[in-house]
Amino acid sequence: MKNLTTTSHALLGLLAVKPWSAYELTRHMQRSSLRLLWPRAESQFYEEPKNLVAHGLATSTREKRGAGSRTVYTITPRGRAALREWLSRPGWGLVTEFEGMLKVAYADSGSKEQLVENLRHLRRQLQGLIDLMQSVFEEWLDAGPTMPQRFHLTALVSRFHVEIVRAQAEWIDWATRVVERWPSTRISDAMTAEGRRVVRGLVDELRRLGKGARRARRASSLPRRRASASE
């Protein structure tokens, strides 16, 4: 019996909505906005429901379906308690796993042309994701979401995805313009000076962001004004 992971709790969250087969869970995780938050191999989604059953967090039953049958998983009261306990603990922030960016970081071992092509490939790849997200969101508006009772939460998550996509697109377009002006990926005095200007601007931006975050924390810590009798 394997330990419970974030994937375990992600599937528990879906089982809390309704019973699913392993195929339905996998299909939903791969086709919904959840795959952008928690991308995992399909094999994990097929195997994890069995682990939930082993932990007593779900039950499995065989159902006839046409000429064949399927296994359907249902959350147990213990599973709902485990899900509530997991939700009560703060989650980790965004962790970037970005091979294309790693190739940018080591581009001085290659050519300028390789770097430009890597950036262009990232832009094409991102455009494919933009097109996919747009079609999915438009389908939600036209035909309705697959789980309308959770649409308010789906909207919150979807806004995050769009902001991340926007940031990637703006960075790729900016980086491509910068690199195309370079004579090569090798260091020079002019490129060092340009790097210092960029980092100086980033420091200023981080200071502004830090001030905004501190103001938001102070505002959230202030006691709420009590409603007057006339309100």
Image (cartoon, rainbow, N blue to C red):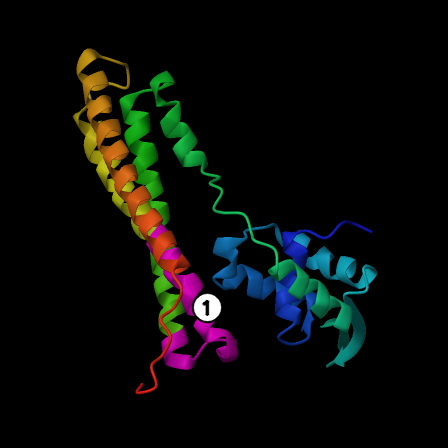
Q: Secondary structure at mark 1?
A: helix
Q: Which residue is mark 1?
A: 154
Along the horizontal axis of the image, is 214 left or right of 63? left
Task: Tell me the magenta residue range.
Answer: 140-164
- The residue lying at 73 percent from left, 62 percent from top is 49
Along the horizontal axis of the image, is 42 left or right of 202? right
> In the image, residue 34 lies at what x, y percent?
51, 60
Q: Quadrant of residue 189?
A: top left
Does residue 156 show up magenta in the picture? yes
- The residue lying at 56 percent from left, 52 percent from top is 91
Q: Residue furthest bottom?
A: 230
In this rendering, the answer to whether 127 lies above or below 176 is below
> In the image, residue 190 lies at what x, y percent?
17, 16
- The residue lying at 32 percent from left, 42 percent from top is 210
What kind of residue is marked 1? Thr
Q: Residue furthest front?
A: 229
